[in-house]
Image (cartoon, grey):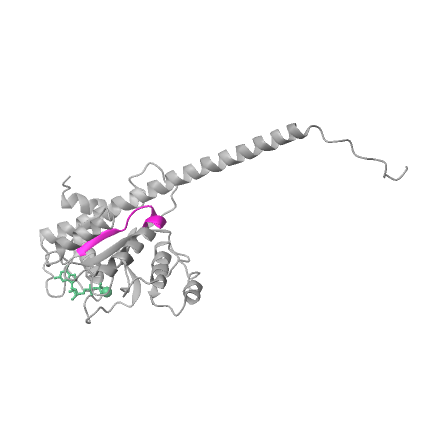
């Protein structure tokens, strides 16, 4: 279904978590689009593109995209699109080793604060020590994981397993697959990469041409793709929040059922055991 860009921008500006749902007890105050992906795949450029398109203002290289070969971003930092919608840039991982997966999962679970990110911790113990540095005095965020991949890069077969792992973990935590964004969508590997992500079970795949230092003149076509991306992020967040609520209801139902069964079996056992024998008073001291 085609939605007018003006209407999408309006929805984005008005968005607060759960505002399309019929309950308000989810506890999320903001939605945070959390970017993941290897270095140089266009995460910081996507942040810049989203900021200028959502706010409808001139392009600026706020996130420091492409400053050095291989990427400059070393930390996790948020950029406001609205008061209740932020996009978080991230240090690009080199390869999804177990430590990197643990760090990514902690970020998705909202257990990690902003600031310096080192994917390659010396050991897992050191990684775990950092987790209590969670959001304190911050609004509760719903974290929507997004995987950024450039069509200008070759797909290496070993990478498929790492990405599959990441998708599976993100799905377990949020109940939805990460949104996949293919950048440089005009590049030669576009069809192959789109197909690969389909094979890996990524249900939401989008492609954009980012605004960059070399090409930052706003066009309707590029704006439309970025708005579409933000729109999908909102739809996916709403779907995940609803699913979480349904899970809560199911969990409550199962807990009640278990308690009921326990009460029934206690009663049954008491009936089977019969009345308890009268206390033996032979050893009581004479009064
Ligand atoms: N042509 C084109 N270049 C892009 C696109 N996205 C990123 N780039 C370029 O790719 C390089 C790395 O981008 P960057 O955003 O820094 O990647 P990051 O390391 O993932 O943050 C920069 O030189 C960008 O200008 C895109 O969609 N199209
Ligand atoms: Mg970067």
Residue 61 located left or right of residue 106:
left
Q: Quadrant of the N terminus?
A: top left
Percent of width and height locating residue 230: 22, 50
The residue positioned 26% from the left and 46% from the top of the image is: 234
In the drawing, does residue 225 fall left or right of residue 247?
A: left
Residue 280 seen in render = yes
Horizontal placement of 144 versus 153: left or right? right
Residue 34 x %, y %: 29, 56
Nearest the camera: 31 or 83? Answer: 31
Q: Residue at x 25, y 61 (%)?
A: 158
Nearer the observer, 110 or 169? 169
234 versus 112 height, above or below:
above
Residue ID at (41%, 68%): 123
Q: Residue furthest front?
A: 157
Q: Nearer the viewer, residue 22 or 162?
A: 162
Q: Is residue 148 left or right of residue 143?
A: left
Q: Assign ligand 1 to one image quadrant.
A: bottom left
Spot occupied by residue 35 in the image (x, y as percentages of width and height): 27, 57
Q: Position of residue 203 (x, y in %)?
A: 23, 46
Query: From which residue to which does the magenta span run?
Result: 171-182
With respect to residue 234, does 98 lie above or below?
A: below
Q: Is residue 114 above or below residue 195?
A: below
Figure disc tally: 0
- Magenta segment includes 279: no
Classify the position of the C terminus by image quarter.
Answer: top right
173 is within the stretch colored magenta: yes
Give the residue displayed 38% in from the left and 43% down from the top: 26
């Amino acid at each position: 279904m085609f939605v007018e860009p003006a209407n999408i921008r309006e929805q984005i500006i008005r968005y607060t978590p759960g505002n399309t749902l019929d309950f308000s007890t989810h506890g999320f105050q903001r939605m945070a689009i959390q970017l993941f992906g290897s270095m140089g795949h266009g995460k910081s450029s996507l942040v810049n593109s989203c900021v200028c398109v959502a706010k409808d203002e001139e392009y600026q290289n706020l996130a420091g995209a492409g400053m050095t070969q291989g990427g400059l971003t070393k930390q996790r930092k948020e950029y406001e699109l609205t008061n209740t919608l932020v996009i978080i840039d991230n240090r690009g991982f080199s390869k999804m080793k177990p430590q990197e997966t643990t760090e990514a999962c902690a970020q998705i679970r909202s257990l990690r604060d902003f600031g310096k990110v080192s994917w390659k911790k010396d050991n897992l113990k050191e990684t775990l020590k950092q987790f209590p540095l969670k959001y304190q005095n911050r609004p509760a965020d719903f974290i929507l994981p997004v995987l950024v991949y450039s069509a200008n890069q070759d797909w290496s077969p070993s990478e498929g397993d790492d990405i599959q792992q990441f998708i599976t973990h993100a799905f377990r935590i949020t109940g939805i697959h990460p949104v996949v964004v293919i950048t440089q969508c005009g590049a030669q590997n576009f069809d192959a990469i789109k197909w690969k992500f389909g094979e890996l079970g990524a249900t939401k795949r989008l492609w954009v041409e980012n605004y960059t230092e070399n090409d930052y003149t706003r066009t309707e076509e590029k704006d439309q793709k970025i708005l579409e991306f933000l729109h999908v992020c909102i739809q996916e967040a709403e779907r995940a929040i609803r699913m979480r609520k349904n899970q809560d209801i199911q969990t409550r139902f199962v807990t009640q059922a278990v308690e009921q069964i326990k009460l029934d079996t206690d009663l049954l056992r008491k009936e089977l055991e019969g009345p308890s024998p009268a206390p033996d008073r032979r050893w009581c001291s004479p009064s």
